[in-house]
Structure formats: C-alpha cells, structure tokens
Amino acid sequence: MAKTKEDILKIIRGAKPNYSNVIDKLTDEDYPVIENLIDDVNVNVNLAVKLVTYIGLLKSEKCLPALEIAAKSEKRELRTVAAFELRHLTNFPKAVSLINDLLDDPNLGVRKFALKTVAASKLINLKEKVELVLEKESNNRMKIFSMGIKDGLDILANNTIMH
C-alpha cells in the first residue's frame, strides 16, 4: 500500500536523515505520491529538494518521472538538484535528454550543475551541446568552467576514438 503524503513528509523531515534508511522505507507504490509532493506548491521547497535528492539516490528508471517534474519546475532549487541527481541515471536516454535541456536553463546555477553532471558522467554525446553552452555563456567564470568541461570531453572523445 502506498504511503500518504503525510507519511512521506514525516520520513524526510528529520534534521539529518539517514539516506539509506529513508530509501529503504520508500516503495514502488510511493513514486506517484512523491511526484505529487515535488509538484505541490504547498510543500516547502526545502522538503521538495530533499525528496528529489532521495529519489535520485534510488538510481531507478522509475525515478525519472519525479526527476523530470523537478527538472521542469518553476523553482530553480528543484531544477538545480534535479541536474545534480540525474548523474545517477545517465544510462537512461530520458535522463540524458533532461540534462541536455537543463544545459539551456536560464539560471546559472542550474547550468553549472548540469555541466557537472555531464563531466561526472562522461557524457561525450553532449560534447556539442557543451560547446554551444560555452559559445552562448556571458558569465566569464562560467565560461572558464564550461571550457574545462569541454576540454575534458574532448580528451575522452579522443581516447575513445584511439581505442
């Protein structure tokens, strides 16, 4: 039986929750409730961020709808944590597509975490997109950061071609 919104919120409200303990308490039946909580305007953004963090740590394809809700949220905090948590799911095309979209986000922080996910996950197939981000970027620090990610992807791509 799926937990109620109140049950799930109670699980995550702890000041320093044990991630594995929380993850163990969530079941497949809870995903739709979690998705509704992430999208609920009445839920405190910090609790929604925790939910997105937990759901990302499950590393399951079943988490993608919840991460998509966060990635497309009007709240930049949710988009930022979605960009970070998607690094656990880059073996799924939908996750890569969401990361690709987040690279175009109007918020600098969201773009930065999307770039970090590209680098951490070695997403060579997004190299051209990173090059476009680099070309469009107006913030000098972010331009330098993007250049480092691009250079790292170039090295990976060259090593892949050589082997």
Image: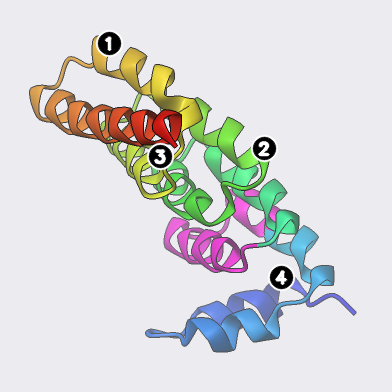
Residue bearing mark 1: 136
Q: Does label 4 or label 3 sit earlier along the sequence? A: 4
Q: Amino acid at mark 2?
A: Lys
Q: Residue furthest front?
A: 163
Instruction: Specify the color scheme.
Output: rainbow
- Residue at 62% in and 68% down: 58
Element at label 1: helix
Q: Which residues are magenta?
A: 35-59
The residue mark sitting in front, 4 or 2, is 2
Discs 4, 3 touching: Cβ within 8 Å: no
Residue bearing mark 2: 94
| Residue 40 seen | no
Q: Which quadrant of the structure image shows residue 143?
A: top left
Residue bearing mark 3: 118
Magenta stretch prevailing secondary structure: helix
Whole-number angstrom distance, CA of label 1 to CA of label 3:
17 Å
Counting from the top left corner in percent of width and height, residue 157 is at 39, 30
On screen, residue 64 versus residue 124, left or right, reads: right
Crowdedness near tag 4: few (<14), some (14–19) or many (≥20) residues, C-alpha within 10 Å: some
